[in-house]
Amino acid sequence: MARTGARFGRRARPRVETMKHSDQRFRLRERVAALAARRMIEGGETAESAKHKAASEILGDASRARAFLPADEELGDALRAHLRCFGGSAHARWLRQRRRQALGWMERLQRFEPRLTGSLLDASATPDMPVELELFADSAKDVEATLLDLGVDFRVDPRSGQRRHVHEVIGFVDPEAPPGPTPAPRGLRGTAFLLTVRQLVALRTSTARCRGPDDPRLHRVERAGAADATMLRQLIAETDEPSDGQPAQSGPR
């Protein structure tokens, strides 16, 4: 029995060391995510650039940096944490204004069953991030024709058709932009929109395909991963500022 206990003890030690090593990696990734979020918010850097620069700065070794790059979900958590701490009510007010702007375009494009996704939905958006909408159509030409009728000057990503069930990705800029909680990056005028035009077959799996952050402080619509116009109206109404002396609702829903 003594031998058995010793054998078990010898095996347990590597597991403890592995757990410590895993915890250290997790904490390093958290630090990288926090610094990357700050670079994105304060410097207007892209996510990829901010992650690589933050990892190199913290680790001091570019060759090791790639192993500690945070996942998109971890970066989203860090962005929300930074914005809650330093953005406060100003960022919340800007989110509502930009969501109303997104809703306006969803109503214009309602025949394509639009869904709001990405950072604007999950509350990690900053003024330089595009509003991400998913549209569903038999052909991307139908969406292009509608945008032309609306007088929109758009661009098509030539590589976008390589993705599964995606016709193309269309970008345009709405000249209107809600005033942000921080100054907009130089050269940015208006609000950028990114429309992913998917095949109709993708509409049946849109709910299962889209996963939002697992953050209990978010509204349930913000955690949904994708929101249609009805859901977005509900989110705006239930996170709106108090009016007529009525207190605003707060906390998870």
Image (spheres, rainbow, N blue to C red):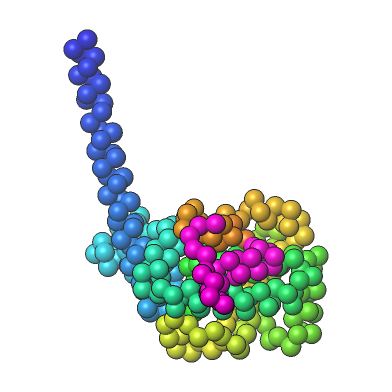
Image position of 7 (left or right of 213): left
What x and y, as percent, mark residue 10? 22, 25
Image quarter hosting the N terminus: top left
Residue at the front extreme?
A: 245
Please say whether residue 75 is visible from this viewpoint: no
Question: Viewed as shown, does residue 229 lie left or right of 53?
Answer: right
Q: Which of 118 and 137 is in front in this view?
A: 118
Can residue 232 be found in the magenta stretch?
A: yes
Which residue sits furthest top?
1
Q: Is the magenta stretch mostly helix, strand or loop?
A: loop
Q: Can residue 99 be seen in this view?
A: yes
Q: Which residue is drawn at 38% across and 59% down?
A: 69
With respect to residue 107, does 13 lie above or below? above
How far from the left and from the top, in percent, is residue 20? 26, 42
Residue at x 68% of width, y 78% of height:
104
Question: Which residue is pictured at 56% across the width and 85% down the height?
Answer: 177
Residue 2 vertical placement versus 65 (above, below):
above
Disc tally is 0
Q: Name the quadrant containing residue 13.
A: top left
Image coords of residue 35 (percent x, y): 33, 67
Q: In this view, does 138 lie to the left or right of 219?
A: right
Where residue 81 sits, quadrant-wise, is bottom left
User: Whole-percent x and y of residue 171?
Assistant: 63, 78
Which of the 4 image quarters holds residue 106?
A: bottom right
Give the magenta range: 227-253
**Closest to the observer: 40 or 88?**
88
